[in-house]
Amino acid sequence: MIRTPFWSALALSLVFAACGDDGVESPDSSLPDGGPPVVDAGGDGGGDGGGGTAPAIASLDPSSVAIASSLMIDGSGFVDVESVTIGDVAQVYAVDGSMIVIDAVAEETPTGDQDVEVTTSAGAVAESVTVLTRLAVSGAASLDATTVSVTFNRALDAATVEADDFVIDGLDVTDATVDDDRVELTTAAQVAGTSYSITVGEVADAFGNALTGDDEAVFPGFEPTLPQITDVSPTTGVVGHTGLTITGVNLAGASVTVGGIDQDVDSTSATEIVTDPLGSAIPTGTQDVVVTTSGGTSGAFAIDVLGPFAIVMAEATSATEVVLTTNRAVDPTSVDPARFSIPALTVTGASSSGSTITLTTAAQTPAASYSAGADSGLVDMNGAPVTSSAASFMGFVPPLPEDFVVVRVGDGISGLDAATAAAVFLERRLLTDASVADTTALPTAAAGANVPFALPGTGFSNRFLGTLSRSPDRQSVAILGYQLAPGVALADGARVVAVIDAAGTVDTSTTIGTRFATTVPRGAATDGTNVWVVGGFGGVHHTTVGSTAEPTLIVAAPSSGRAIGIYEGELLYSSSDGTSGALLSQVGTGMPTTASTTTPIYTSDTPSPAGFAAFDLDAAEPGIDLVYQADKSSGLLRFRKSGGTWALEATFTPALLDVACFADGADVTCVASSDSDIYRLEDVGHTTAGGALTSIATAAANTEFRGIALTPGAP
């Protein structure tokens, strides 16, 4: 395979072109021989970002990183780094060889499992990391006259804890013992009821994250009747859902405030208080828990208070996919399609990552108004059920193409003639002004499994060769030609299929044995694996990408195929053999790979049918109901099915070889090619009366255009 710069734009629908019958049609004096360079669509060079090495992440240190703490990203390919994000939040970073250093994870970064994504000019790579809240002091309490308990919001690394890390105004600290998230300090004798302030120094959690949150707490000196809080569980609560368990001493009969708001109490004992769910009036954020008894008031113990769990946004990201965003991470074990409802749509799949839920739906109506909801079985990581459970969104509206691909025959230097093979190029041109964005050369010599590819330079029948079709997944285009080097006389012999994918990989390893060896090769279509070909007097044949075996005959008639393509899941081809009368036919059902029959779509007495584009736009008409047919003698023909009957309703001039179209709301936009020009049609309401097309590009000297298609790899 040859990898060269290619597609990078948007494209929507595939298009197919067709060629002459038997290669002996009379010249068309109304069409000039010369032709402009052509364009197809492309990226910036396969998967290597134009020659660079794609980035790779070998390790993250630590594997769980706290907000405002540092993260080391070890890997390779960290050249021309464009961005580093965690959970889609941009980070400030520095690159040092194979290491990217984030000194402090951004405050806006969401907690929970998040993707660390490094993007360079050569690509992007992601690796998961767990983001934690800042390590912080939750509270302190005196357990007896010489013992103080300091509680943190998660477990500490005992190796980082020393008595010198704890400073208490007015008290010496002589020893420190770590037990998970608590440190017991041995102090000098406390004065009963005196308020002491403790400041904590350089301790770290079990993952190596430094203390970047609150590093202070206040507690009263020990006295036998004074209430003291040693722990609160959980340390993160949701209003309306989470009840607190407060442990300590002298707690019997206590009242509780959270964030200064009285909190209902379910039960108390000397060592434990159990509260009702947090009241809705309690402010969110870090709030102090304080207990009061007849013996006095405790020191404060900090917890994080969260608002109700809610769906805050919904967006359709494809015709069958909707992404919901919640205000915090969802518990993935609670995500099930049955929990979600979208009136008028069936939800068939559901998955989550952090605060993002991806739903698979039935096909949406573009721009229709929908509302996505969930039942209370959907919970956050705290077990809180979703309470605000609906968000509106608009049915997916596909983005419009930005560019197209056109086949150019000739290098612009060597002259072209009807009896000599010429070099072939695929050009990507912008829809806005038809300017060339990039060009890809098809191989002119054998290289590995690839063989040379060429097309004849001029001539009426020769210009039917080189039609383009795009695969139904929009990821590749296919073209059929001669297995010859440029400058060699045209001859009977091997024919070759070129498949070019969205990354710009050119594959000419597919040959078709003796098929069309003594006549003209005209069109090819692929679904990425299978290949179907048509040509002069041979019917439709099937092979696979990379095969060199003799293809399988699928249908024999109509015999002389002009162009072939796949629309609405059906294989179609245009023809003109003078006997069947069929202008466009369907091959079997679906995309057959064995012997099938043909069904005429419509017939016409137009003399030189070529490429076509087909649509299913009318809900009242089953299957394809609108076709734009390029004709080498007549122009661009618009056929429509109404009440089950097809009719030719408009003709746009001049004569053409191929056409590519896409729907833009109620309108259809087409780009079409002759050997000399590229044309554009804005078919308003797809009912515009026939007339002259607008030329948007002209072929340069010693070049001609052939097939045209929308850019692979785009919507």
Image: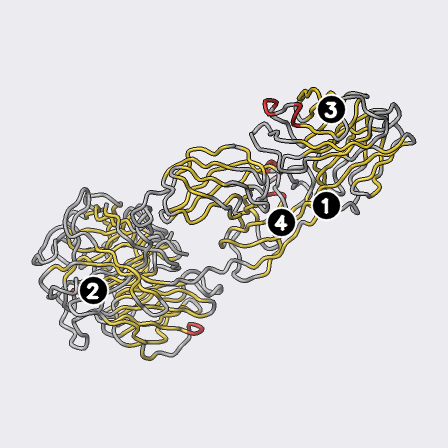
Q: Which residue is mark 4?
A: 341
Q: How far separated are the C-alphas under marks 3 and 2?
A: 95 Å
Question: Quick one: label 2 or label 1, which is nearer the N terminus?
Answer: 1
- Residue 705 versus residue 515: which sits nearer the camera? 705
Q: Which residue is mark 2?
A: 464
Horizontal side, residue 551 vs residue 118: left or right: left
Q: How far separated are the C-alphas under marks 1 and 4?
A: 29 Å
- Residue 32 versus residue 193: which sits nearer the camera? 193
Q: Which residue is mark 3?
A: 172
- Residue 221 versus residue 346: which sits nearer the camera? 221
Mark 4 packing: few (<14 Cα in 10 Å), some, or many (20+)?
some
Name the mark nearer the viewer: 1 or 3.
Answer: 3
Horizontal side, residue 107 vs residue 115: left or right: right
Q: Position of residue 620 (x, y in %)?
A: 49, 65
The circle on residue 284 is 1
Q: Residue at x 45, y 60 (%)?
A: 399
Question: Quick one: label 1 or label 4, which is nearer the N terminus?
Answer: 1
Q: How far separated are the C-alphas under marks 3 and 4?
A: 62 Å
- Quarter where residue 569 is shown: bottom left
Question: Quick one: label 4 or label 2, which is nearer the N terminus?
Answer: 4
Q: What's under tag 1, amino acid-wise?
A: Thr
- Numbered disc 1: secondary structure: loop
Q: How far separated are the C-alphas under marks 1 and 3?
A: 36 Å
